[in-house]
Image (tube, rainbow, N blue to C red):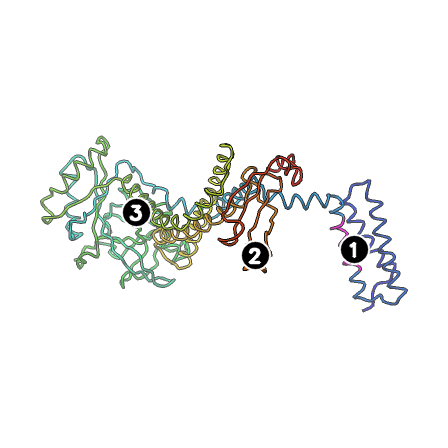
């Protein structure tokens, strides 16, 4: 294939230059375009007269013409100013905080937000202020669930403080569905449990009073199990799966915001009419009580705990603990805080040396510098820790979801905590290093590095580094060796004469 004729080649090259000239101001376009067109004309005629016009040289000329756009941009905007701003703006404290806020905003608008608030938000119940939970204490060896069911059915008739009661028995189980096997928690419940909580299914129906005799193998799925096994199939009602080796039929799916008050239950069945083999210390019973509306919850909690522990129909030595939903939420928060503190303790111990450097090399002048220095460090660190928390929840969500686990909240909580601790370690490391590399006055990144010795002769010369604020505020002395010419990391303030040599105070004020 032959190259284009010279006149056509010149026409295409001049067209590219004309398009690029639109970037320039009107008063400068003509001179700039004439300069480029003259260069292209001489180049093209040289190729023709020397017989070197080939497809390769033609492509080289066209590529050179495309470079006119970059040249026009540099003429439109001062190259020196642009490069200076590109170097100085990322080192300003305002830019650092804007990046942190941008990362936080991106995290809040991502998937972790809904998932995170699903984990920490209280579940939606009809009347949570009247709901109490009954569970066995640590002193009780075990209690047969059927015995608690029979006893709890009589409690509303024995005291006016209870409007209604429901019983459950939870245990570790295995489900096998279309997506394989899952280890999860299941619960046998009385038919009125969902009605007592005021919960409604998102698909199908919940249990009815006639189900124990007519639908012994019916199950209600949690929203997570429905997603992991059936991929949100709206026609899941009537389908079957295996629960502990027994075939069961799905009759309903609970909504995403529904959570069982005590455990992360994934599948619900009924107390069967026939005998159920006892599972001591494997299947644990509990009850839910709906307190009368005219009774104060704190008073009902104390009196009902005495009442249920004096029940004659239960074996001797059976002791119950009654808790409100606020108590359960408080316990969950304490558990989260305990795990975080347990992880933060060794993390802070590891960072103790870096925090000491931050304090020893910090500002030594006016209190205003101290306040700005530590306030900037605190705001930056807190923003990044929140980003690390939301990111850890997203990572936990992805990991647990891809592993097809229905116990998403339980597993995600553990995974999120440990991933967050790793993210906190990285965040503190970067935040401290970034803070140490900033001016103690203007908080800009130190842009001038001075090596006090030849790096290749470090074993002979006692070396050190000095980082200088380019606005002339001060110098950070950084030792390279313990026995070097710089014996310790410290900050030295410079007088006004250095600011004239190193920087422009007005530019510093505008940028920071």
Q: Which residue is mark 3?
A: 260
Choose between 1 and 14: the one closer to the eye. 14
Indicate the quadrant containing the C terminus: top left, top right, bottom left or bottom right. Answer: top right
Give the image quarter of residue 52.
bottom right
Q: Which residue is mark 2?
A: 461
The residue mark sitting in front, 3 or 2, is: 2
Furthest residue toward top: 294
Image location of residue 292, percent across then percent down: 22, 34
Crowd around label 2: few <14 · some 14–19 · many ≥20 (10 Å): some
Q: Residue at x 64, y 46 (%)?
A: 87
Q: Residue 65 bears which disc, if any?
A: 1
Q: Earlier in the sequence, mark 2 or mark 1?
A: 1
Crowd around label 3: few <14 · some 14–19 · many ≥20 (10 Å): some
User: Do the numbered discs 3 and 2 sit on residues whose CB atoms are within 8 Å?
Assistant: no
Image location of residue 276, percent across then percent down: 18, 58
Main SS of residues in magenta? helix
Q: Residue 101 bears which disc, if any?
A: none
Helix, strand or loop at mark 3: loop
Q: Earlier in the sequence, mark 3 or mark 1?
A: 1
Alpha carbon separation for disc pair 3 and 1: 69 Å
Alpha carbon separation for disc pair 2 and 1: 52 Å
Helix, strand or loop at mark 1: helix
The residue mark sitting in front, 3 or 1, is: 1
Residue 465 higher or lower than 300, as above or below: below
Alpha carbon separation for disc pair 3 and 2: 69 Å
Highlighted magenta segment, given as a residue range:
61-71
Q: Residue at x 28, y 62 (%)?
A: 247
Question: Is 491 a magenta residue?
Answer: no
């Amino acid at each position: 294939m032959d190259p284009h004729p010279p006149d056509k080649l010149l026409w295409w090259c001049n067209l590219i230059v004309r398009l690029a000239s639109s970037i320039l101001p009107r008063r400068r376009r003509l001179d700039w375009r004439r300069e480029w067109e003259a260069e292209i004309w001489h180049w093209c005629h040289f190729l023709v007269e020397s017989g070197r016009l080939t497809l390769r040289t033609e492509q080289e000329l066209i590529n050179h013409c495309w470079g006119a756009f970059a040249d026009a941009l540099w003429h439109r905007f001062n190259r020196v100013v642009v490069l200076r701003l590109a170097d100085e703006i990322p080192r300003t404290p305002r830019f650092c905080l804007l990046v942190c806020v941008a990362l936080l905003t991106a995290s809040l608008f991502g998937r972790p937000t809904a998932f995170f608030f699903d984990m920490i938000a209280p579940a939606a119940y009809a009347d949570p202020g009247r709901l109490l939970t009954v569970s066995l204490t640590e002193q009780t060896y075990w209690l047969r669930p059927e015995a608690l069911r029979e006893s709890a059915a009589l409690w509303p008739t024995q005291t006016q403080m209870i409007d209604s009661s429901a019983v459950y028995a939870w245990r570790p189980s295995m489900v096998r569905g279309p997506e394989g096997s899952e280890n999860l928690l299941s619960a046998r419940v009385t038919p009125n449990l969902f009605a007592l909580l005021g919960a409604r299914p998102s698909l199908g129906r919940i249990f009815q009073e006639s189900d124990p005799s007519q639908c012994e193998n019916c199950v209600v799925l949690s929203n997570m199990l429905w997603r992991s096994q059936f991929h949100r199939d709206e026609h899941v009602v009537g389908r079957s799966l295996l629960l502990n080796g027994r075939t069961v039929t799905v009759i309903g799916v609970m909504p995403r915001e529904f959570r069982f008050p005590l455990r992360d239950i994934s599948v619900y069945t009924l107390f069967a009419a026939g005998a159920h083999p006892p599972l001591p210390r494997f299947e644990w019973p509990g009850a839910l009580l709906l307190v009368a509306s005219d009774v104060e919850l704190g008073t009902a909690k104390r009196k009902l705990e005495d009442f249920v522990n004096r029940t004659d129909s239960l074996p001797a030595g059976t002791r119950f603990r009654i808790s409100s939903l606020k108590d359960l939420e408080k316990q969950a928060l304490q558990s989260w805080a305990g795990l975080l503190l347990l992880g933060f303790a060794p993390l802070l111990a590891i960072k103790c040396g870096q925090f000491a450097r931050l304090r020893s090399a910090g500002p030594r002048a006016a209190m205003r510098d101290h306040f700005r220095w530590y306030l900037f460090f605190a705001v930056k660190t807190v923003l990044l820790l929140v980003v690390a928390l939301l990111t850890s929840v997203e990572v936990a969500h992805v990991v647990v979801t891809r592993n097809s686990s229905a116990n998403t909240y339980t597993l995600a909580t553990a995974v999120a905590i440990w991933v967050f601790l790793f993210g906190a370690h990285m965040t503190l490391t970067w935040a401290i290093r970034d803070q140490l590399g900033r001016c103690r006055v203007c908080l800009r990144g130190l842009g001038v590095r001075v090596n006090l010795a030849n790096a290749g002769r470090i074993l002979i010369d006692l070396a050190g580094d000095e980082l200088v604020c380019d606005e002339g505020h001060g110098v950070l002395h950084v030792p390279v060796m313990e026995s070097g010419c710089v014996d310790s990391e410290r900050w030295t303030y410079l007088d006004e004469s250095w600011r004239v040599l190193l920087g422009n105070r007005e530019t510093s004020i505008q940028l920071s």
